[in-house]
């Protein structure tokens, strides 16, 4: 099983192979109270980020081109991206997420992909 | 949150305003900022929402591109307040290759021309909506 993450937005889906060590998940929960007031976790977030190498052409079973990355970036509206992982990233998932990407570098370009999602798919 | 994408060609309609040959390598960058918010519902789910998108672009190009300045004076020196114009930003990755459309938005173009380096620094502040 390859170590991949899949981002699905509507009918568009891309599968990427993150640069090892760049995948981070967790944080961003909606915590209330604290200090002298008992704290409570009102909402659970499934956020994360990873980096991939941008390629000029579609590789075998991987979609790392600029156009493919652009196709899953969230536009105006509700979060609409589903995230799932395979291989060593099998436990990673997120639903109804807002996804952003930043492409950086001149010769060898990398794309930092981040997502802010929730625990359950929208009904 | 914000997205950043590279570009190396600018068009107005089908006319190429700045071709890749004029771009300073690696200088073209579009930043798209999302006006995001989140609400938590009583079932413990966080719902993320993007209200608007604000695009900005910047690049450097060889030569004098002051004529691209929004509301630049015409030959007679006339100026007039004006709304932004719609521009398309593309990425050409191979010689004579098909460009990848990065984004189209209406923006105010500002140009600073440096005579010492014969180079224009161009910034475009935009709005996701067209009016």
Image (cartoon, coloured by chain):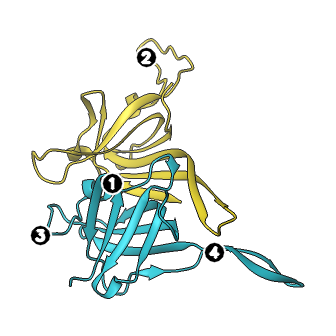
Chain colours: A cyan, B yellow
Q: Do the residues labelled 4 and 3 touch (CB within 8 Å)?
A: no
Q: Is residue A72 left or right of residue B129?
A: left
Res B64 seen here: no
Instruction: Looking at the picture, tell me which residue is in the foreground, A86 or B42.
Output: B42
Q: Which chain carries label 3?
A: A
Nearer the observer: mark 3 or 1; the answer is 3
Say which residue appears at 44% left-offset and 60% top-offset.
Answer: A100
Instruction: Looking at the picture, tell me which residue is in the foreground, A14 or B70.
Output: A14
Same subunit under labels 1 and 2?
Answer: no
Residue at label 2?
B74
Q: Mark 4 lies on which chain?
A: A
Which disc is residue A29 wearing? 4
Mark 1: which secondary structure? helix
Mark 2: which secondary structure? loop
Q: Distance between the residues labelled 4 and 1?
A: 27 Å
Q: Residue furthest left?
A: B96
B131 vs A83: above or below? above
């Amino acid at each position: 099983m390859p170590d991949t993450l899949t981002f699905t937005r509507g009918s568009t889906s891309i599968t990427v192979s993150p640069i090892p060590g760049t995948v981070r998940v967790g944080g961003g929960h909606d915590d209330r109270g604290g200090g002298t007031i008992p704290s409570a976790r009102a909402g659970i977030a499934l956020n994360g980020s990873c980096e991939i190498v941008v390629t000029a052409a579609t590789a075998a079973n991987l979609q790392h081109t600029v156009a493919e990355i652009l196709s899953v970036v969230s536009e105006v509206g509700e979060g609409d991206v589903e995230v799932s992982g395979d291989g060593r990233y099998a436990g990673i998932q997120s639903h109804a997420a807002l996804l952003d990407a930043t492409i950086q570098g001149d010769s060898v370009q990398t794309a930092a992909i981040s997502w802010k999602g929730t625990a359950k798919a929208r009904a | 949150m914000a997205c950043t994408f590279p570009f190396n060609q600018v068009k107005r309609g089908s006319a190429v305003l700045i071709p890749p040959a004029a771009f300073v390598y690696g200088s073209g960058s579009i930043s798209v900022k999302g006006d995001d918010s989140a609400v938590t519902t009583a079932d413990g789910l966080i719902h993320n929402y993007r209200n608007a998108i604000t695009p900005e672009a910047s690049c450097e190009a060889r030569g004098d591109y002051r004529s691209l300045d929004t509301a630049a004076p015409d030959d007679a020196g006339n100026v007039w307040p004006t709304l932004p114009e719609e521009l398309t930003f593309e990425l050409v990755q191979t010689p004579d290759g098909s460009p990848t459309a990065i984004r189209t938005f209406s923006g105010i173009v500002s140009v600073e021309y440096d005579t010492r380096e014969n180079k224009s620094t161009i910034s475009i502040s935009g709005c996701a909506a067209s009016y």
